[in-house]
Image: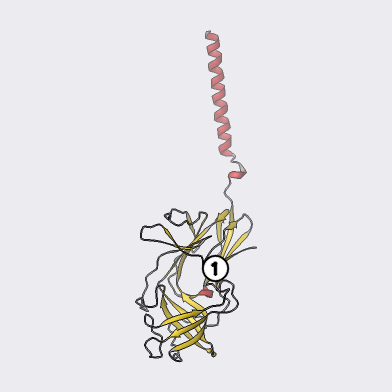
């Protein structure tokens, strides 16, 4: 009996040594499937209708409005996009923002730029399927339009991200609530800090980042439309000047026009 016990103890010691050795081997030589893989994402902002002089820093002096209603084409916008993030999780109405976000912008932008002037460096990301985008915007922005009857006459119109009657200050540096986009459309966090659905006009399809391949997200003004919107500038106070917070704009857009969309490509 004593001999059997000694043999059993010896076998257990040998088994323990074997397990320690094999575990040590696994740590030294990890399986290839467990290696972290990455791919490249490019984020671009496209405008099919640009014509305004680049480099203007929102000190442009508008020509007089033509009357109670000035008929113009929408050509671009000058806005401040602060940061852009992507996530492999999906934004869902009624849920809090517990998503894991990866920031694409290396630093927060604080300047107003034309939509087509934004350049974001390619970013190396973990491989996988990405389902959501979020971005930050400052409250004030400038709409760029051209007179329909004479496209050499251009306007840069100060606006806010809220309604046309909201307080409007050229020196405003505040940010609006963060914008979120996913397969169903746009969202914002409400006062209860859960996602509230804002509409289907700015959907983003799922896109995949693969090792050795570049995915491109094109944020497009006009959503691929070939003709711009007509903007009717309403001179509410009859002074033939654009007054943010008083005057307002009525829009007439082609059937295929949406303010923005996200087009996914690969190279």
Residue at 56% x, 28% y is 19
Q: How many marks?
A: 1
- Where 141 sits versus 19, above or below? below
The answer to which of 265 and 248 lies nearer the viewer is 248
- Where 146 sits versus 255, above or below? below
- Where 255 sits versus 99, above or below? below
180 relative position to 209: left or right = left
- Where 172 sits versus 72, above or below? above
> Residue 103, image x and y in percent?
48, 60
> Residue 139, image x and y in percent?
40, 72
- Residue 126 appearing in the image: no
> Residue 168, image x and y in percent?
36, 78
The answer to which of 196 and 28 lies nearer the viewer is 196
The residue sitting at the top extreme is: 1
Residue at 59% x, 51% y is 37
Q: How is the image coloured?
A: secondary structure
Q: Quadrant of the rendered structure where residue 43 is? A: bottom right
- Of the 4 image quadrants, the one containing the C terminus is bottom right
The answer to which of 22 and 230 lies nearer the viewer is 230
- Residue 93 appearing in the image: yes
Label 1: few (<14), some or many (≥20) within 10 Å?
Answer: many
> Residue 229, image x and y in percent?
53, 79
Residue at 60% x, 77% y is 226
Residue carrying label 1: 261
Q: Secondary structure at mark 1?
A: strand
């Amino acid at each position: 009996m004593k001999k059997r016990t000694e043999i059993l103890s010896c076998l257990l010691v040998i088994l323990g040594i074997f397990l320690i050795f094999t575990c040590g081997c696994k740590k030294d030589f990890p399986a290839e499937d467990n290696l972290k893989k990455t791919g490249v994402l490019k984020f671009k902002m496209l405008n099919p209708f640009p014509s305004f002089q680049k480099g203007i820093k929102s000190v442009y002096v508008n020509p007089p409005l033509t009357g109670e209603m000035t008929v113009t084409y929408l050509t671009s916008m000058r806005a401040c996009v602060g940061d852009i993030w992507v996530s492999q999780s999906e934004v869902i109405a009624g849920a809090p923002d517990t998503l894991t976000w990866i920031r694409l912008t290396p630093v927060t932008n604080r300047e107003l730029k034309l939509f087509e002037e934004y350049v974001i460096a390619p970013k190396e990301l973990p491989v996988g399927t990405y389902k959501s985008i979020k971005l930050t915007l400052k409250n004030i922005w400038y709409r760029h339009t051209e007179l329909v009857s004479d496209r050499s006459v251009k306007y840069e119109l100060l606006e806010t991200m809220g309604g046309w009657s909201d307080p409007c200050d050229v020196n405003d540096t505040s940010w609006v609530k963060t914008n979120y986009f996913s397969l169903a459309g746009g969202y914002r966090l409400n006062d209860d800090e859960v996602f509230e659905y804002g509409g289907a006009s700015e959907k983003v399809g799922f896109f995949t980042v693969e090792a050795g391949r570049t995915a491109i997200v094109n944020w497009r003004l006009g959503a691929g439309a070939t003709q711009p919107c007509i903007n009717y500038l309403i001179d509410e106070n009859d002074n033939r000047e654009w007054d943010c917070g008083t005057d307002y704009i009525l829009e007439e857009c082609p059937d295929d026009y949406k303010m923005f969309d996200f087009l996914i490509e690969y190279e």
